[in-house]
Image: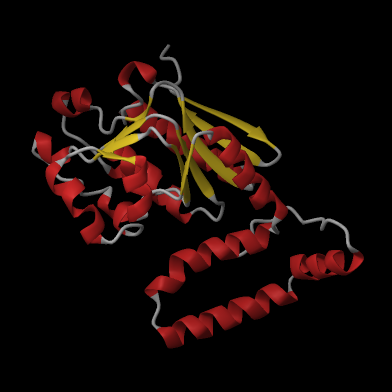
Amino acid sequence: MTEPVVRSTADRGIVTITLDSPHNRNALSRQLIEELGDALHAAERADARAIVLRHDGPAFCAGADLKERTDEPADSSPFVAVLGTLMNTARPTIAAVDGAVRAGGIGLMAACDLVVVHDTTTFALTEVRIGVAAAIISVPILRRVPPGRIAAAMLTGEAFDAADAHAMGLVTHVTDDVPATVESLCAGVLAGAPTAVAATKRILHDVPNLDRTTAFAEMQALSDQLFRGADAIEGMRAFADKRPPRWAPSTGPTS
């Protein structure tokens, strides 16, 4: 029986999903993509407050499993589905990166809301060097990074470092202690109301793509909805009482 290459644990409502295929640098094999998709859906069914995507071994993800791609025609739809789940779930997703990231692994990382990387991490979009393009992963990448900031990396395949990745907007946090930074972010998520956190993720994704009139109309409706909600009532009461709020276990509004 094949050993699993993705592991999942839950603690305080935070689901941590670990890529555990160090023999091939956590390459995006059919097995890894399928197990990752299953783990993400399980986290949603469990009403996770946040999802952390981390790795074992020296690489976060080396990109496509080229041996599989050589052996038979590729079906990219499961990978597209995984990226879509990371981007669309109401829960904040956090990539915890403490090793090299290449090609499709950058897309997997970029599909997360927050990206925490060790300051020694290196990246490369090597697709052009094997005769293909960073096509699918351009969707999450170019939602984070202006095309001109990442054009050289995509056109040449040259490696770049954590400081470069942060400057272009590809990653959100550069640190010498990835677990501690991720823990701090998770604590912050848990301190907020589930409905408010879910609504904020929706705002971050939707508002930049709306014209101003539509944005004001939709955000006014969302604000009115939230202020009438149970979490706002509890939050304001807790503020007045000078006590921590007691949030209901709900993910709140989704897009």
Q: Camera-side residue: 160 or 56?
A: 160
Q: Camera-side residue: 116 or 223?
A: 116
Task: State the colouring used for the structure image.
Answer: secondary structure
* Residue drawn where x is 16% and y is 33% of the image: 73
Residue 174 seen anywhere in this rendered image of the structure: yes
* Residue drawn where x is 32% and y is 35% of the image: 122
Q: In this view, does 225 lie above or below 69?
A: below
Indicate left or right for 227 with 1 as reference: right
Residue most toward the top?
1
Question: Residue 78 at x, y = what percent?
Answer: 33, 41
Q: Quadrant of residue 29?
A: top left
Residue most toward the left?
131
Tally of marks: 0
* Residue drawn where x is 88% and y is 58% of the image: 243
Indicate left or right for 177 with 66 as reference: right
Q: Is residue 218 above or below residue 249?
A: below
Q: Is residue 89 above or below residue 15?
A: below
Q: Camera-side residue: 8 or 186?
A: 186
Question: Residue 229 at x, y = what percent?
Answer: 74, 71
Question: Residue 180 at x, y = what percent?
Answer: 60, 36
* Residue drawn where x is 20% and y is 35% of the image: 74
Q: In this view, does 221 lie above or below 175?
A: below
Question: Residue 119 at x, y = what percent?
Answer: 42, 36
Looking at the rendering, in which quadrant would you find the N terminus? top left
Residue 81 seen anywhere in this rendered image of the structure: no
Residue most toward the right?
241
